[in-house]
Image (cartoon, coloured by chain):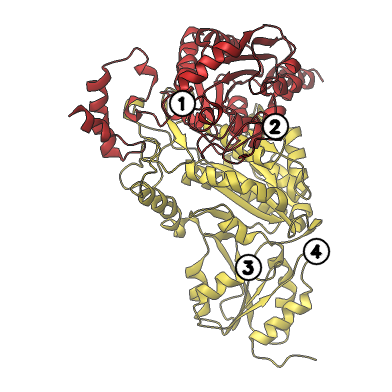
Amino acid sequence: MEQLKMESYRTDKTLEEHGEAEGLIKEIHGVHPMDYLLRTERLPHIWCPGCGLGTAMTCLLNALVKAELDLDKVCVVSGIGCTGRVPGYVRLDSFHTTHGRAIPFATGLKLANPELQVVVISGDGDLVTIGGNHFIHAARRNMDITVICVNNFNYGMTGGQAGATTPIGGYTTTTPYGNYEYPFNVSALAAASGAVYVARWTVLHARRLERSIVEALLKPGFSLVEVISPCPTGFGRRHRQREGIDTLRYYREHGVIRHGTDPRETDIALGGAIIEGKFVDIEKPTFLEQHARMLEHIAGK
Amino acid sequence: MSEAEARGILSGVFFMQGDIACAEGAICAGCRFFAGYPITPATEVAQRMSERLPTVGGIYIQMEDELASMNAVLGASWAGVKAMTATSGPGFSLMMENLGLGVMMETPCVLVNVQRGGPSTGLPTLVGQGDMMQARWGSHGDYSIIALAPSSPQELFDLTIHAFNLSELYRLPVLVMTDAEVGHMTEKVVIPPAEEIEIVERRKPTVPPEEYLPYRPEPGELVPPMAIAGQGYRFHTTGLTHDERGYPSTADDSAQWPLVQRLIDKIEKNRAKIIRVEYDHLDDAEVAVVSYGISARTAVWPIQMAREEGIKVGLLRLVTVWPFPDEQIYELAGHVRGIVVPEINMGQIVREVQRSAAGRVPVFSVPHPGGGIHNPHKVLQAIRQAAGRKLEE
């Protein structure tokens, strides 16, 4: 009977079907303490078993609560991809924009109403491949937004293709003989472009990740948290990590916490160390502070 | 402080460039956010906004490209601020992606295209009207759009305000399809007193957040009230096909049908309210010139010359190009024996005129690939041809 009900779930449902699913959710898992921050009527989510996105999203929600933000003022913005679906599950003002364009959309939101706390959460393909130009320019401007980049080294939603973060030698559906393009280091890219806060954690280090997101949320200016996350379906199974748990074991074996490391020395190679920690935490006037200075200047004229 | 000062309105009579008039129109309409990228011949709009917006409590930002510009405009609109961008052909192409997002999320904003010659980089400093079909069909998928075609700096001022009003009323990006000649032309522009400028504000939800469905129009309406970010509505919006809650619904066509149909209906069922055309000397006309933007002005002299030759000819000027004034053209086609359509492209709007005329009269295209305005003699020749006169050698 329970089995039958589970089968009635679909990743996308009509309005009527949603209502039915809502009843099922309560029956199956009761009431969860985070439910008030989730669009529970949209559950279950579309992510594969073993995916790291559930952990990443939970860390974000916990961080929003711990940072004691006015949740009515929080906007969650994404582009396209598996991570891009996060805004659809959080019960906050949420925007699922076009591929790569979350950051400029977020820029418009923040500048039009600086009272908003604007968080971008999207994948590596979205933020630093198709959206790479927006990423570096928002960092350069020290735009007052928090960016969470969930990096799984491949395009999960479209079926495991290579992207700008795929390590050399990585097998994907479009690098069947191994990737031979040099990848971007997301954290180093942000730091080099002007980000005032840069941290990287794997989803195995969930508490540290959560703490970093709190810091990033409270940091004025452009902050980046890179989340290294398993994609068993697209990436893991081609790298002897059949299930999500295999990738978490890999993180335990290869993760090296080293705060303050020069981001240029944190490249991620297949089989190499994954350097984690807080790499950048500096003070620099933000875009809006710079803008306010300009206004003072013209008022004084 | 007077109302005009408070709203940043420079009431008075000016000798003003079209692009500048466009920026002033935006300020009058209440635009307080501009995101753009420099491109000839639209740059002066951005320059003027960069100077004016900081003085009226607005934000100007130069983005890294036109993809970003259009998205920043959408973001600003969702934060509750009237927002605009201005560009020309190559930038217009880049904006198509997120014009579609604006249509899908039903986001009020204004996109100005000061058209130049194309395709590609084309003629950066010279006039064109080759983006008229792109304005209608440029972003993928099916939707309806509103596009206006000013033909003078004054009208660039007036129609920019009107574009903002329409965008708020119908919740979509509205296109101001001007051209390099009008944008760079300097003429008399009257900015009226603040109280004479009609401004339409966005309709806000009247229900509390727990009852609010972002994409459910009120009974009998086609445009849903719009919540803005940061006010506790905790809404979701997406470029995916969505149901009335804004939630993705992509497994079948059950949400696609009502959504796409409503996106089209909210414009097409309000055609009578949206469409504006201008009639000149058409009461007794045997020939009509149908044109828009700078080309409608080029047609004035050949119309006078033809009248002096005894050809009864008048002008129907399209102020609204999209939705296309089908009914007005059909009716016109019942009164005249020929229609002449000069435009600075190789024949775009003439197709719509032919379609709307429905075979009632012959329709003559007067094309131009861009780079200059029409030679008025060519338009005159076409008028003579439409009137059935023998052509001069």
| Chain in red on the image | A
Residue position for label 3: B348
Tag 1 and tag 4, C-beta contact below 8 Å: no
Both on one chain, marks 1 and 4? no
Tag 3 and tag 2, C-beta contact below 8 Å: no
The amino acid type, in three-letter code, at marker 2 is: Tyr
Q: Chain of mark 3?
A: B
| Chain in yellow on the image | B
Give the class, few, some or many, for how many residues have Cα within 10 Å of label 2's Cα (few <14, many ≥20). Answer: many
Tag 2 and tag 4, C-beta contact below 8 Å: no
Mark 1, mark 4: which one is toward the viewer?
1
The amino acid type, in three-letter code, at marker 4 is: Gly
Mark 3, mark 2: which one is toward the viewer?
3
Q: Residue B88, how many percent across, how many down?
A: 72, 51
Q: In the structure shown, which secondary structural element does the residue marked by tag 3 occupy?
A: loop
Residue position for label 4: B371
In the drawing, what numbered circle is on residue B302? Answer: none
The amino acid type, in three-letter code, at marker 3 is: Gln
In the drawing, what numbered circle is on residue A93? Answer: 1
The alpha-carbon separation of the residues under discs 3 and 2 comes to 34 Å
Q: Residue A19, how many percent across, how many down?
A: 25, 33
Q: Chain of mark 4?
A: B
Report the residue at 69% width, 11% height from top. Answer: A279
Viewer-proximal residue, A279 or B170? A279
